[in-house]
Image (cartoon, rainbow, N blue to C red):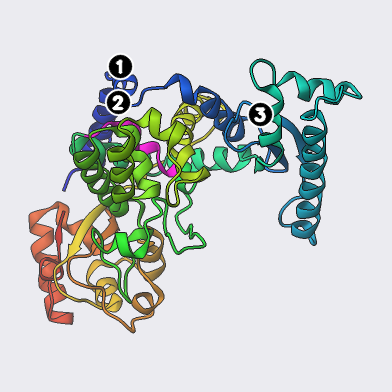
Amino acid sequence: MPSPHRQAALLLVALLLLRALPALAEEHFPLYESIRPNVAFWEKIYGSVSENTSLLHDRRDLSLVYGSVTLWDKNAPGATAWNKTRLEQATAYYKDMLTRLSTGAQPADAEEIRIRSMFSGKNALGRMTLAADNIRSQRGMKERFRAGVIRSGAYMPEIQKIFLGYGLPPELSYLPHVESSFTVEARSKVGATGIWQFTRSTGQDFLNINEAVDERLDPILAADAAARYLSDNHSKLQSWPLSLTAYNYGANGMMRAKNALGDYERIFREYEEGYFKFAARNFYSEFLAAVRVAKRLENDPSLALHQPPLVKRHVVARPSYISEIERVTGVNRDELRRHNPALLPPALSGKKPIPSGHALRLPLNRGRFAARETPRQTRAGETAAAKRHNISLSQLMRAK
């Protein structure tokens, strides 16, 4: 088992490797001219627009931002209904304005002059007609994104090591900022779970998901799965913009889009099939924006990022109840729960065994588990455990 100093040295090497790859991002993740307005829009949403503000914008051309609406805090009583009404009123206001201006009517005030100036050049009136039915609102995420960067400090060094280990661009480790803001317990309306937002069907291809454990909830185990999934996508699509979009839209869907139109830019501009709507079209732009904003915040000296815990993975060698893990390792249930978010209530309550193959995180130099550092102590600890529980630490789990 590596010492804490050894672990720190390995993390430092990984971070130095990242700094040595400045050209890699542009090579693998190009900022196409066609998506510059979208990336700028999402940078604003992530970096400067408050959660209590919503921007009204065009669904396809994100450079067209008509105005903003101040919202009530989403946790305030009655906020959902009030915010919905306020956004509907603001949308109707700009829809009516665009509809009137699209007839060739002269602007009546300064606000209409401003909106009219957004549609200069060829077919301006026709574009305003389309825009009137294409208004969308987007709530800001500044506070949530900042909190996500703080949380990411506990996981990012290990996640970056995983991606580097697979030979993948380390920038991919920033994807949870788009998916979940590094919220471990995140769950979407369609059942996507954890910071990497794996659905159950996709997650089962890479992770253990059963009554006792849901490894989608473990940021590091799921990071390994995400690295393999993204690598599979890239093997099929041969493009990181397409592979990242496939993370949202699905590899088969993106393969159909690639076969139909070829490259990412044409797909972004022209593809309209199936469920390729706003979310899929913007996913790569959101990723580029998230990387930019997160890196700026990581370099902000006023931001205290969470630190990685000093833990070591040990794979459960055979199905084992949590009481056995507690007795043999000397680590109590609350600490096991804290370090292992994949453990579900049936496992934590002792109703179901933790399955073989699951990799538990155990704190370094704590309890009887620390005895593994010294061979003589390990033998004594295992002997005592065998006498009391008829099981040894080496029989119960193996280091990973």
Considering the whole magenta stretch, tell me its main secondary structure: helix
The amino acid marked with disc number 2 is: His
Q: Is residue 15 visible?
A: yes
Instruction: Kindly indicate whether the residue at mark 1 contacts the one at mark 2 (C-beta within 8 angstroms).
Output: no
Q: Quadrant of residue 22?
A: top left
The amino acid marked with disc number 1 is: Ala
* Viewer-nearest residue: 218 or 378: 218
Residue that numbered label 2 is attached to: 28
* Viewer-nearest residue: 206 or 91: 91
The amino acid marked with disc number 3 is: Arg
Estimate the spatial distance between the alpha carbons at disc 3 and disc 1, rounded to whole Å: 38 Å
Q: Residues within 10 Å of mark 1 (few under 14, many from 20)?
A: few
Residue found 49% across the figure and 30% down from its top = 289
Between disc 3 and disc 1, whose residue precedes?
1
Instruction: Kindly indicate whether the residue at mark 3 contacts the one at mark 2 (C-beta within 8 angstroms).
Output: no
Residue found 41% across the figure and 75% down from its top = 345
Residue 127: which numbered mark, if any? 3
Q: Is residue 255 magenta?
A: no
Question: In front of the other: label 2 or label 1?
Answer: 2
Q: Residues within 10 Å of mark 3 (few under 14, many from 20)?
A: some
Residue at the extreme right of the image, as rendered: 108
Residue range highlighted in magenta: 168-176
Where is 168 relative to 119, above or below?
below
Question: In front of the other: label 2 or label 3?
Answer: 3
101 left or right, relative to 310? right
Secondary structure at numbered mark 3: helix
Residue found 41% across the figure and 61% down from its top = 338
Estimate the spatial distance between the alpha carbons at disc 2 and disc 3, rounded to whole Å: 34 Å
Residue that numbered label 1 is attached to: 23
Q: Position of residue 234 (x, y in %)?
A: 23, 39
Q: Position of residue 349 (x, y in %)?
A: 38, 80
Q: Position of residue 362 (x, y in %)?
A: 28, 58
